[in-house]
Amino acid sequence: MSLYLEHFGLSETPFRITPHTDFFFDGADRGATLEALIYAVLHDEGIVKVSGEVGSGKTMLCRVLMERLPKEVETIYLATPSLAKDEIIHAIGDDLKLAFSQDRRTVALRELQEHLISLYGKGKRVVVLIDEAHVMPEDTLEQVRLLSNLESNRHKLLQIVLFGQPELDATLAKTELRQLRDRITHSFRMRPLSPAETSKYISFRMRAAGYRGPDVFLPAATALIARASQGLNRRINILADKALLAAFTENSHAVTERQVRAAIADSEFAAVKVSPLSRAAVLGIATLIAGVAIGALFPWERETRPNPAPAVKAQPVVAPQTQPAPAAVAVASAEEQEDEEEEMELYAQAALEWPPSHLSPAQVRRLNAYPTLGQKLLGDRLAATIELLTHADNGRYSLELYTSDNSDPARIERFLTRARDLVPLEDLFVIPLPTGNKAGGAWRVRVMLGRYDNREDALDAARRLPPKYQRAFQPAPRTFAELRQAL
């Protein structure tokens, strides 16, 4: 895998799925949750619960918490919570190097309490971090409640943090566990990453692995990863790693939408529709991904087989002045572009129509011709807009806030910066509309809000807009068919 790292100028693999605390991403409320956990542990806050879907980053958060706690905090990490109620006491005792005089639970609890009092007298705190707590038997959970009762005259002697999947919430909701539920002082939920957060997460991981330069993953690629992964960290890592490998096999220093589709095709969890125009190419790249991955496992074969791509050191890439077009970023050379155009002409001759709910390639090119001039929020929202217009059903609605002839990117960036204090930024979409056919011509900009199943829902959303927006704009429902037709 050394060639893969050298190709992108990386010092280590950026998208490993095993927890590595140097790659902790504090966006999407992860940093705030970490700070809250540290506060709870240090201020006698009883039992704390952290829940989230598979692959949302719970174990990573747990590991970082262990690192960030001060030295006077003794951490006990239980990675196998399917212990019987008697076993969990002995597991804690083993970590504290405490030998119980008897196996009886009442005796073990008393001796554990005496040991914890001794530690507290020396200025030490003890916290038990239970990973995968959703698989813990109910009688063991009840034992956790009893452990939380261990205290001195004024202080809790044992802090407990439960990390588990949403099934843990369902278990704790049972009537027989209401006493344990009442002792949970703080509950945190690890939500999936939004598309914008996914883009930041991928960029962060690349730079944490030593990359220096413009973002390798183009906006359309990160938008597709966000959709296919459903915002779950582990899935993002898997797709990003496979997409990087696909780019490496093509000797490319940019990850495009086409390479992400190949990664999706090579992953069992992501069922994202592949465009008919690129299905053959996607399958071919997916085969290369598998081949290179196998080659990495058997490095001795490199002595007798040519490398899939020559070792190319990371080279500086000049940042483009406009956002790259998702439909065109896969084109690595003029020759490849000609091949792709010929392929599209063949499909057109065969009377294969573009799906009615999708943008045509020409529409995508027109949208991406709009110069964002490096404005970050505007670039993110433009990529999200293209993704939305590509896949939203014709009959669904969005709210038009305003359309303006003033298309200055800096002005729109300022609007987006202010808007995120009033509405969710991920609900805002920017549609640039060219007013002429010449390159570099004038533009109009249409700003849309939300996605709604029908006109009534859109009108209801308009009535619930912040008063400032109701005074400044005249929101109008627009179908996605209408929005696409204007392009």
Image (spheres, grey):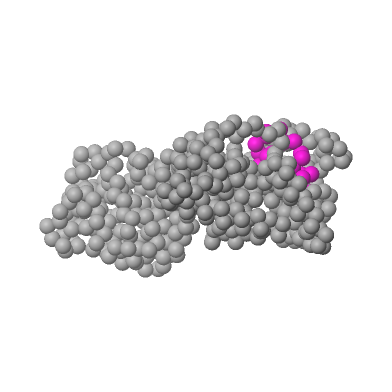
**In the image, residue 144 lies at what x, y percent?**
30, 59
The front one of 21 and 316 is: 316
Tell me if 337 is positioned left or right of 130 in this view: right
As drawn, the residue found furthest toward the front would be 304
Measuring 55% from the left and 34% from the top, which residue is drawn there?
314
Where, by quadrant of the figure, is residue 179 drawn?
bottom left
| Res. 28 visible in picture | no
Measuring 37% from the left and 39% from the top, which residue is drawn there?
68
Tell me if 287 is positioned left or right of 155 in this view: right
Measuring 42% from the left and 39% from the top, which residue is drawn there?
22
Q: Is residue 280 magenta?
A: no
Prevailing secondary structure of the magenta residues: helix
Q: Is residue 364 magenta?
A: yes
Measuring 83% from the left and 53% from the top, which residue is drawn there?
485
Tell me if 481 is positioned left or right of 97 in this view: right
| Res. 131 visible in picture | yes
**Across the whole image, how many numbered discs are drawn on residues?**
0
In magenta, the rendered stretch is 363-381
**In the image, residue 89 lies at what x, y percent?**
24, 58
**In the image, residue 205 lies at what x, y percent?**
50, 41
Tell me if 360 is positioned left or right of 266 in this view: right
Where, by quadrant of the figure, is residue 91 drawn?
bottom left
